[in-house]
Amino acid sequence: MTIRNNKPSECDRCHVKFIGFENLSHDELSAFKESHCKVQYQKGETLIKEGTRCNNIICIKRGYAKLYIKGLEDKSIIIKVLKEGDFIVSPGLFTDNLNHFSVSALTEMDTCLISVDAFTNAFRNNVSFAESVLKLNHGITNDLYSQLINFSHKKMTGRIANTIIYLSEKIYNSRNFYTTLSRQDMADLSSVSKESLIRVLKDFKESGILSVTGNHIEITSPKTLYNISRVG
């Protein structure tokens, strides 16, 4: 992890657009700029650890991360993949001031850390900004609900099909993509074992549903994949 204080003028040149930040007043945006610092993370580093105090709001400028919780037997359940333009607010910020999930880097990452004080002040005094933050956290909650439905009602092939569609539509915006997730990460996102994931990916490949070469995945029969995801 590398930390560097940014000058406020650097924020004005930033190309990344964070949802809701356009609703900040001049004074609120200035408070964000004055309080923040730039932090670079290496692949595998932890940005947030479940159970620790909420110290900063993390804005992702470059790279990918996984948001996850610990399940039984210390197994990870990945709830969401985070990417450029996302910012991370723990629901515990306004309750017990604890992080209720962990976040770790899937790739090298550039982030900006904003002080909790500057963030909460804007949240309490700017209705439009507060609504955007609530929508963000509601999205994470909806992802959790979707995962619970997938895990409880879908078979293994349906879960893995759903994961491929999620990566295609929500993360990489393409049916032909290179994933930054390891096979173990994809298994954790699907709530299956790594061995089961590899076996199903091989079956999908042999059936002409996917083209898989290493971490490069192409959905070659989207209709079939969507049907597998739907029926579970």
Image (cartoon, rainbow, N blue to C red):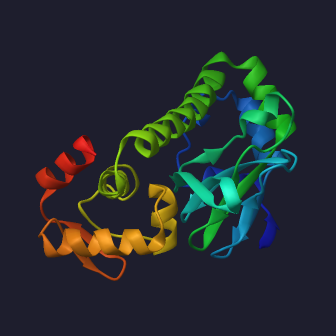
Vertical comparison of 178 with 114: above or below: below
Vertical comparison of 146 with 164: above or below: above
Residue visible at 23% across and 60% down?
Answer: 175
| Image quadrant in which the N terminus is located | bottom right
Vertical comparison of 18 with 120: above or below: below
- Outermost bottom residue: 214
Position in image of residue 89 (x %, y %): 70, 40
Residue visible at 24% across and 41% down?
Answer: 230
Task: Say if residue 182 shows up in the picture.
Answer: no
Out of 200 and 222, give the one closest to the viewer.
200
Task: Say if residue 4 shows up in the picture.
Answer: yes
Position in image of residue 107 (x %, y %): 56, 72
Residue visible at 47% across and 43% down?
Answer: 147
Out of 112 and 166, give the one closest to the viewer.
166
Residue visible at 83% across and 28% down?
Answer: 95
Position in image of residue 171 (x %, y %): 40, 55
The reply, left or right, for residue 87 in relation to residue 145 is right
Position in image of residue 226 (x %, y %): 20, 48
The reply, left or right, for residue 28 in relation to residue 145 is right
Q: How many marks?
A: 0
